[in-house]
Amino acid sequence: MQNSVFFKSVINSNSIFDSMGLLGHFLKESIGCEQICLVLMEDTQRQEPVAYSYNMLQVDSNQLQELAVQADFFERIPDGRPLRQDDKIDGISIAETSFHTIYPFHIKRNATNGTLLLCFQSQRSLTSEELQICRINKLHMDQLIDKIYFRKQFLKEQSYESLFNTLRMKDSFTVDHCYNVAFYSSLLGERIGLNPSELELLKVAALLHDIGKLAIPDHILMKPGRLSDEEFDVIRQHPAIGYELLKDLPEVKEILPIVRWHHERVDGRGYPDGLHGNEIPFLVRIVSIADAFDAMTSTRVYRSSLHVDEVRKQLITNANTQFDEQLVKLFLDIIDEQMTMSPLTKGE
């Protein structure tokens, strides 16, 4: 499985349980790791952590869960440093487990703390290239946990919960797309140095950017074939409709530009208001790129997903016409980092 496909599969997952199967299958193919275990606990909880495993007996999963707690989630062991049956590193030993070699990778996202354990029944030494694969996959798991945490917080706290849940019942694909756009937007927002409050605003606005599709008739929104010009004109109304749906809700003033203008273009040929260049707010330009990337790399009812290489070409071709050129460059750098399994540099 190509790493770009794995990356999209994990990010599209709606649960850690689902993603563990994808991760386990990928690591089995790429580095020969037969069994993995993810042990997680939220900082605010004072209860047993949750263990997710792939291809592992319950007794082994329970042992690793207990060991993770005893070893403070292996926080004293650097990412990717192997633990073996005859080792005792900083007071940590795996002698009581059924595994000969375990590679721990730390998880720390928001209020979630834990470790991803790659387990081998025999002695195993990973190469620098294999360790790079593991670190990138751990990063993807970090980000999935971040996405799920944000999803829980959003649904629990925001005044527009009912609107979003209505969209979920109408079109679950659009809901998943919105979560992905929020995720990609946050990656780009972090790269350019947005502060935590700006990042939270960006993610919420990205999540609601397509809320106007609530008013689009199902026979148009779900149409499996090419839209007619008249049908496309209806679809083009969703940014303005979303603006109207949200404008009277409390504390939404700062997200309204993203909802209304995410289909504007820097060359002035976008909709609904034909904004040009710097008339388009900075956060809107971020969401526009994230929106296009997820749309092109996702399978739709009317077409299959495009390969990331083709999407890269499309973004570059449309930089400085549809999209902000500098933001496109930064975004593609991020995607390359997410999907490249290059060898580690010496000393890492």
Image (cartoon, rainbow, N blue to C red):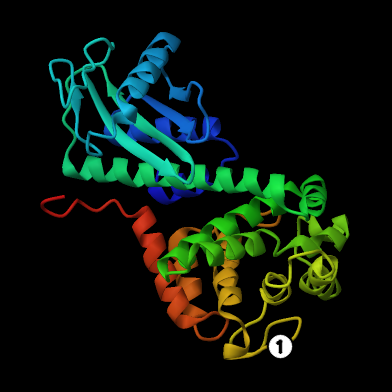
Per the image, label 1 sits on a secondary structure element best described as: loop
Q: Using the image, determine if residue 304 lies above or below residue 192.
A: above
Instruction: Please state the horizontal and vertical placement of residue 216, each as a whole percent of the image.
Output: 85, 62
Instruction: Please state the horizontal and vertical placement of residue 267, each as a whole percent of the image.
Output: 60, 89
Foreground pick, 259 / 298: 259
Q: Amino acid at mark 1?
A: Gly
Foreground pick, 133 / 287: 287
Query: Which residue is rendered at x = 22% and y = 38% of the image?
Result: 78
Residue under label 1: 274
Q: Using the image, determine if residue 136 lies above or below residue 331.
A: above
Q: Is residue 269 visible?
A: yes
Foreground pick, 59 / 92: 92
When asked about the image quadrant of residue 26, the answer is top left
Q: Using the image, determine if residue 5 lies above or below residue 107.
A: below
Query: Which residue is rendered at x = 74% and y = 67% of the image?
Result: 252
- Locate the N terminus by quadrant: top left
When asked about the image quadrant of residue 208, the answer is bottom right
Q: Is residue 12 visible?
A: no
In the image, taking residue 233 as reference, residue 10 lies left or right, namely left
Q: Dot 1: few (<14), some (14–19), or many (≥20) neighbours within 10 Å?
A: some
Query: Which residue is rendered at x = 64% and y = 55% of the image?
Result: 177
Q: Using the image, determine if residue 74 lies above or below residue 338.
A: above
Instruction: Please state the horizontal and vertical placement of residue 76, each as a whole percent of the image.
Output: 23, 34
Foreground pick, 195 / 296: 195
In the image, taking residue 197 as reference, residue 31 lies left or right, namely left
- Picture mark count: 1
Instruction: Please state the horizontal and vertical placement of residue 317, each as a whole percent of the image.
Output: 48, 79
